[in-house]
Image (tube, grey):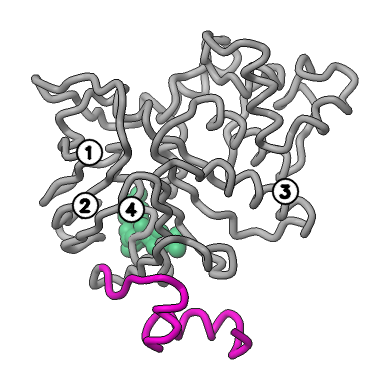
Amino acid sequence: LLNPIHKINMFIESYPKGMAGFKRYIDFIETEPEIADRVNAKEVNHVEGEVIFDNVSFGYTEDKRALHNINLTVRPGETVALVGPSGAGKSTICSLLPRFYEVNEGSIKIDGIDIRDIKLHSLRSHIGIVQQDVFLFDGTIRENIAYGNLNASEEDIWHAAKRAQLEEVIRALPEGMDTLIGERGVKLSGGQKQRLSIARIFLKNPKILILDEATSALDTETEKAIQEALNELAVGRTTLVIAHRLATIKDADRIVVVSKKGIVEEGTHEELMNSQKVYYGLYTAQFGLQL
Ligand code: ATP
């Protein structure tokens, strides 16, 4: 089974128009249960980005709940980090927002509108996802950044690449934006792929962001570049970070501790450290007592 958040990214964007990338999308689409639009579902052209999970419960199967009564309000532009042990449901919470799965009980609202009342493609146009495994298709760097967005101008694409700290990398390649990547082209490093996915999101410019934080170690310089790009990406966007390494989310506006029982604690890093409960335990386990 693929991690839910991993799968979403395959669907969240409109698929690229180039045939090379098309086949892989079809493979995924055909294996997915369809989530249909409600009869009266509408297009929502602009969102402020307030996200509310109202008493949400969800199970992948009928007999086992992965989430119990999740209540969470994220203000427009706020960055909320989800932390907690493996299997607590962090990815699941995030995968319900673009309606990769439907809630069993409760509701999720964006700007007060139940997400089931928004057309799926419209809902997903407001959500960007950055994760460790980046989906690239056989094509040029330009096509991979534009990712099916036929309206993107050359200037927009370069601007997105620059903000994702990818400009120098592209300029250093003999064929620049025209360089082929993917199975038949240049292999990008893990860090470069991540920045490419960040460039895509800059170009898409959604109000809501889901960051599935990388767990694998990148070299320090690459990690710094990516962290800077992500910090810039999060500005002015409602951001949910699935955090594995607590050091990177210390500055989040709010940290929410998820356990199998639900949300057990929330606050800023300082508040949670001072209260010396679950987060304090997770943090000191990762970093010892050097706070
Ligand atoms: P991690 O930190 O390891 O990524 P997490 O907190 O993100 O964990 P989830 O991946 O959301 O946790 O998993 C929550 C629960 O749902 C777990 O019990 C997990 O086994 C289960 N689960 C996750 N994805 C699926 C799936 N596609 N099908 C069935 N069960 C799943």
- State the CA–CA distance, disc 2 to disc 3: 32 Å
Residue 80 occupies quadrant: bottom left
Q: Nearer the viewer, mark 2 or mark 1?
A: 1
Provide the residue designation for mark 4: 92
Image location (x, y in percent) of residue 4: 39, 46
Provide the residue designation for mark 1: 111
Provide the residue designation for mark 3: 225
Image location (x, y in percent) of residue 83: 42, 67
The circle on residue 53 is 2
Query: Would you say the beta carbon of the disc 4 residue lies within 8 angstroms of ligand 1?
Result: yes
Q: Amino acid at mark 3?
A: Ala
Pointers 3 and 1 in contact (CB under 8 A)? no
Q: Which residues are magenta?
A: 263-291
Residue 20 occupies quadrant: top right
Magenta stretch holds residue 282: yes
Q: Residues within 10 Å of mark 1 (few under 14, many from 20)?
A: some
Q: Which residue is nearer to you in this view: 254 or 136?
A: 254
Residue at 45% over, 85% down: 281
Q: Secondary structure at mark 1?
A: loop
Nearer-N-terminus badge (4/1): 4
Q: Secondary structure at mark 3?
A: helix
